C-alpha cells in the first residue's frame, strides 16, 4: 500500500483508511481485531473512528488493540460533536464538550495523544472562535497533533480556515466528507476550497452503503434483507432505496460493472480506485462488516484505472449542475 501526505502537511498516511464505525456494532470485537491486524499486514497505518460510534465502544475496541502495538506506527483519528449523553453539555463544539470529549477519547483509546481530531459537524450554537481556539489549545498541549472537519459546507470550511489564519491558530488539515460515484456534490464548493488551501480529503462512504459494491442491479425491485440499504430504509438513513433507485444510479452501476469486467477487478475495487484518483483525495475510508468485504476493499490499492476508464466513470456519474455552477462550468 502506498502512502500519501495529508494535505500540505508532512503527515504520511496509507492510501486507504480503515473506518471503525462498524466496530462493536455490525462487527464483533473479534472480527474488528482481525480487520485491524489484516490492515496492518497490508501496509495500512491510518485508522478513523469517533466517540459517538457505538457510544464509545468503537474507540474502546481500537484502544485495547493499540495496547499491543507500537503507538507511533499509526495515525489514529477520532471525532467530537454528537451526543454522548442526555445532559445539556454532552453535545456540540463548546469548549466544555470538546475538552470533556478529548479526555474521554484518550482514555478509551488508551493513548496519550490523538493524531487527527475532527469536529464531526458544524455547530450553529457555538461561536466558531470558541471551537477553533479550543482545538488550537489541544494541539499546543500535545494531546492532539492535527485537526480536521467533517460534514461542513464550503463557506463553513473556508470561514474556519480564514479565521484560523487571521488568529494564528492551528488550521484544519483535512476534510472528511461524503464522496463517491453517486454523490459528487463535494466538487461544487468543498473540493475547490481543499485544493486551494491544501486540505486533504478523506471521503466517507466511498461505496455509498453498498450501492457501489456490485450487489445491486437495475432489474432488482428492492434491497436484500440484511443489507445496509435495507437497514437505511428502516432507520431513515440517507442511502435508501427510494433515494437511489433511479436511472442515474443504474447508469453508474452499469458502467462500473463494465469497467470491472475489463480490469478483472470487483465493482467495489473500481469504485474505490476512482475515488483514490480524484483531486485532493488523500485516502478513502473503507468500512466493512465482514472479512470478505474487507479483503475485497483492500484490493482497491496497488493499481490504477486508465484515463479512458476514469473518463467513462466521470461521464456516467456526472449530474446536471445547478445554478450558478452551470454558468461557471465553461
Image (cartoon, rainbow, N blue to C red):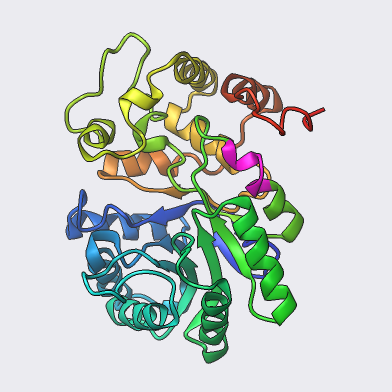
Q: Using the image as rendered, state which of residue 71 and residue 159 is in the foreground.
A: 159
- Which residues lie in the magenta part? 185-191
Does 72 appear above or below 223?
below
In the rendered structure, the answer to whether residue 328 lies left or right of residue 307 reads right
- In the rendered image, residue 179, in percent from the top left (x then y), is placed at 52, 41
- In the rendered image, residue 28, in percent from the top left (x then y), is placed at 17, 55
Q: Is residue 246 visible?
A: yes
Q: Using the image as rendered, state which of residue 269 and residue 52 is in the foreground.
A: 52
In the rendered structure, the answer to whether residue 34 lies left or right of residue 244 reads left
Does 14 appear above or below 167?
above
All told, the count of numbered labels is 0
Q: Residue at x 71, y 48 (%)?
A: 192
Q: Residue furthest front?
A: 125
Q: Residue at x 33, y 76 (%)?
A: 105
Q: Which quadrant holds residue 90?
A: bottom left
Q: Residue at x 64, y 72 (%)?
A: 171
Please state, as top left, top right, bottom left or bottom right, where the C terminus lies in the image: top right
Does 62 appear above or below 322?
below
Q: Using the image as rendered, state which of residue 229 and residue 125 is in the foreground.
A: 125
Amino acid at each position: 500500500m502506498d502512502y500519501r501526505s495529508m494535505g500540505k502537511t508532512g503527515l504520511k498516511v496509507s492510501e486507504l483508511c480503515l473506518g471503525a464505525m462498524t466496530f462493536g456494532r455490525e462487527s464483533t470485537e473479534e472480527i474488528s481485531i482481525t480487520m485491524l491486524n489484516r490492515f496492518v499486514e497490508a501496509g495500512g497505518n491510518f485508522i478513523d473512528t469517533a466517540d459517538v460510534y457505538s457510544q464509545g465502544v468503537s474507540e474502546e475496541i481500537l484502544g485495547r488493540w493499540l495496547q499491543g502495538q507500537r503507538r507511533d506506527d499509526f495515525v489514529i483519528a477520532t471525532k467530537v460533536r454528537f451526543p454522548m449523553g442526555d445532559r445539556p453539555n454532552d453535545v456540540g463544539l463548546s469548549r466544555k464538550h470538546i475538552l470533556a470529549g478529548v479526555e474521554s477519547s484518550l482514555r478509551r483509546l488508551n493513548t496519550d495523544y490523538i493524531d487527527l481530531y475532527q469536529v464531526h459537524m458544524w455547530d450553529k450554537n457555538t461561536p466558531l472562535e470558541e471551537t477553533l481556539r479550543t482545538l488550537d489549545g489541544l494541539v499546543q498541549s500535545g494531546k492532539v497533533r492535527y485537526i480536521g472537519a467533517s460534514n461542513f459546507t464550503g463557506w463553513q470550511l473556508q470561514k474556519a480556515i480564514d479565521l484560523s489564519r487571521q488568529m494564528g491558530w492551528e488550521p484544519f488539515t483535512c476534510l472528511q466528507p461524503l464522496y463517491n460515484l453517486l454523490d459528487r456534490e463535494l466538487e461544487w464548493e468543498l473540493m475547490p476550497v481543499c485544493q486551494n488551501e491544501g486540505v486533504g480529503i478523506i471521503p466517507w462512504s466511498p461505496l455509498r452503503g453498498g450501492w457501489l459494491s456490485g450487489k445491486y442491479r437495475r432489474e432488482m425491485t428492492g434491497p436484500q434483507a440484511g443489507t445496509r440499504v435495507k437497514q437505511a430504509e428502516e432507520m431513515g438513513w440517507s442511502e435508501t432505496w427510494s433515494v437511489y433507485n433511479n436511472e442515474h444510479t443504474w447508469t453508474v452501476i452499469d458502467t462500473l460493472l463494465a469497467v470491472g469486467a475489463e480490469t478483472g477487478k470487483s465493482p467495489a475495487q473500481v469504485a474505490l480506485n476512482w475515488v483514490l484518483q480524484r483531486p485532493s483525495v488523500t485516502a478513502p475510508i473503507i468500512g466493512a462488516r465482514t472479512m470478505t468485504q474487507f479483503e475485497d476493499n483492500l484490493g482497491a490499492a496497488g493499481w490504477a484505472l486508465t484515463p479512458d476508464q476514469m473518463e467513462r466513470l466521470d461521464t456516467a456519474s456526472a449530474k446536471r449542475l445547478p445554478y450558478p455552477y452551470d454558468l461557471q462550468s465553461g
